[in-house]
Amino acid sequence: MKIYEEGNITWLEMSLPNNFHVHWREIEQLMYTLQYSAMQFGYTMGMPNLIEPLINMLRANSYYDAVQSVKQKQKLAEHSKFYVTGYLTDNTTVEDVKQAKKSGVILAMKLYPSGATTNSHFGVLDVSKMWPIFAYMEEHDIPLSVHGEVIIPRVSLYDRERVFVEIILTEIHRAFPQLRIILEHVSTKEGAQFVQSAPVNIVGTVTAQHMLCNCNDVYMYPSKNCYPVINSPADQDAVIIFATSGESSCFLGTDSAPHADNIKFCDGGSGGCFTEPYAIPLYLKAFEYAGALDERFEAFASFNGADFYGLPRNIAKLRLAKKSQVIAREIMIAKDLYATPFMAGEILDWSIDSII
Ligand SMILES: [Zn+2]
């Protein structure tokens, strides 16, 4: 990664980053949402919690085909490579996981505790029933991607990840010590500590919103609501320290989720921050604020995730200019549907220039 001056402009050039956690959402939205991943990422991994979740290879393949067809139609950059995630349910069989591994389109299997987030009601009710699946995944080196929250009525929103880590994640790791696990969107001190003190097969992704905000911001701006919720200032500090540690156990996953305003800004609305159109400039803001805009950012954004998934690092580079831009107030995410992006109306210091 290098930062240099040329023609009175400050430029940043880095190995093309990857995003190992994004929601492009339904097939009819791909024409609107996929381009934002392609304009700044090499590998991008789409999540499976659609209205018709990717619970088997038939669905995963048809979604993957739709992604490829949009890539072709829109002539999205050649370097962009898209993958999807398989969705574990109470009915997933070892055969399903075997097929997923063989497919080449699925990089990991995702565990959603039932009810934790958008379209997760198909998810797993009783994690202990997954033991034969986890045993197969451990033996065949298939990574387990985890949405780490418990849904228990007497557990506060702010403690869901802590309790999940303490009870469920610890138990899975103890029972399957070689299983490769990604704790997605680490949002608490306990989540970060778990990953940092675990062996190398345990990693975590970090979003820009969990670095840039804490619960005080969410209270004022409902567009910042997501799951796991953006937590206390102390948790925000722990997430920043984790992401900027330079360790190979943390990497970039935006968890960008384009929900239309009418289903987000209402009672019982969907959670999720729409960050993808500004993803790298948002992370740059967070890393710059933490004084970590150096090789630690490139490791986090471009190397660690590719290494974990066994993918070659990108040869292409992303170039950004230190030119300020204002985040749009709304962005079209499907025909006649708009979403308010995360930090709408606020200023970012960096802008994407090109892929070289
Ligand atoms: Zn997600």
Image (cartoon, grey):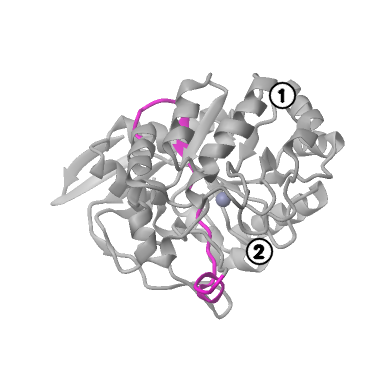
What amino acid does circle 2 point to?
A: Glu
Q: What's the CA distance linking mark 2 and mark 1?
A: 31 Å
* Horizontal side of residue 335 vs 339, given as left or right: right
What SS does tag 2 mark? Answer: loop
Residue 245 point in image, percent of width and height: 35, 29
> Which is nearer the eye, 200 or 210?
210
Q: Characterize the local packing of mark 1: few (<14), some (14-19) or many (20 or more) Cα atoms within 10 angstroms.
A: some
Answer whether residue 72 is visible to the viewer in this image: yes
User: Which of the marked residues, 2 or 1, is nearer the chain's N terminus?
Assistant: 2
Residue 255 point in image, percent of width and height: 51, 51
Answer whether residue 183 is visible to the viewer in this image: no
Residue at point 77%, 49% (across, down): 55
> Which is nearer the eye, 241 or 330?
241
Q: Quadrant of the C terminus?
A: top left
Residue 335 point in image, percent of width and height: 58, 77
Q: Which residues are magenta?
A: 244-267
Q: Which residue is mark 1?
A: 138
> Which is nearer the eye, 191 or 104?
191
Q: Is residue 175 magenta?
A: no
Q: Which mark is residue 26?
A: 2
